[in-house]
Amino acid sequence: MEIDSFALGKRIREIRKQRGLTLIQVAEQIGVSQGFLSRVENAKVAPSLENLLALGALLQWDWNYLLTGSSNGGASSEEEIKVLSLWRKLTSRDRGVLMYILDRLNHKEAVILRLADETEEQEAEKAKAFNL
């Protein structure tokens, strides 16, 4: 799925304004500059996933609407809220690992098989080390 940066920025601005928040208020609350947030809304720069998650937590938007323009009722689904909650509990390193896995899932299912094979190999090595 390719995301239209212009449409994404436009929807971020729309949701922010619907919530009655200014650029300054949102930028301060998510830890970015007002200029950066303005450039995101004007499709001059792409927000990182971390920025999108922070915006999502603050604005409590419908992720489907944000990314595709079609709505599932205006609120985040329970599944999205759970994912965000779990994401916030991860360490920076674990977030990187998860992002790698998600990226690979979006590109090749073969990665799943490779990870499973690696896990089996690691378990076999551990068993061998303990003479099991």
Image: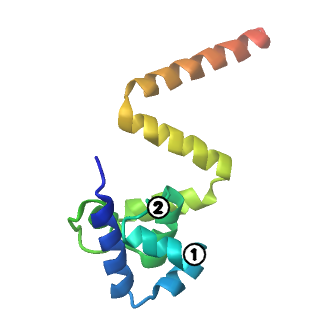
Q: Tell me where residue 108 appears, x and y as whole percent.
A: 37, 29
Tell me the SS state at disc 2. Answer: loop
Is residue 83 something that shows in the picture?
yes
Picture layout, residue 112 above or below residue 4? above
Closer-to-camera residue (31/74): 31
Q: Residue at x 53, y 86 (%)?
A: 25
Picture layout, residue 37 above or below residue 68? below
Distance of label 1 from label 2 (alpha carbons)? 12 Å
Instruction: Return the disc, 1 or 2, that comes first in the chain's sequence.
Output: 1
Residue projecting furthest to the bottom: 20
Q: Tell me where residue 2 appears, x and y as whole percent.
A: 29, 48
Q: Quadrant of residue 65?
A: bottom left
Q: Residue at x 38, y 87 (%)?
A: 19
Q: Tell me where residue 67 appears, x and y as whole percent.
A: 31, 60
Residue type at the position of mark 1: Ser
Q: Residue at x 39, y 81 (%)?
A: 16
Please indicate whether residue 96 sits to the left or right of residue 77 in the image: right
Closer-to-camera residue (56/32): 32
Q: Residue at x 28, y 75 (%)?
A: 74
Residue 33 marker: 1
Q: List the residue tagged with mark 2.
A: 47
Please indicate whether residue 23 sits to the left or right of residue 4 in the image: right
Is residue 132 something that shows in the picture?
no
**CB within 8 Å, label 1 to label 2:** no
Picture layout, residue 118 above or below residue 60? above
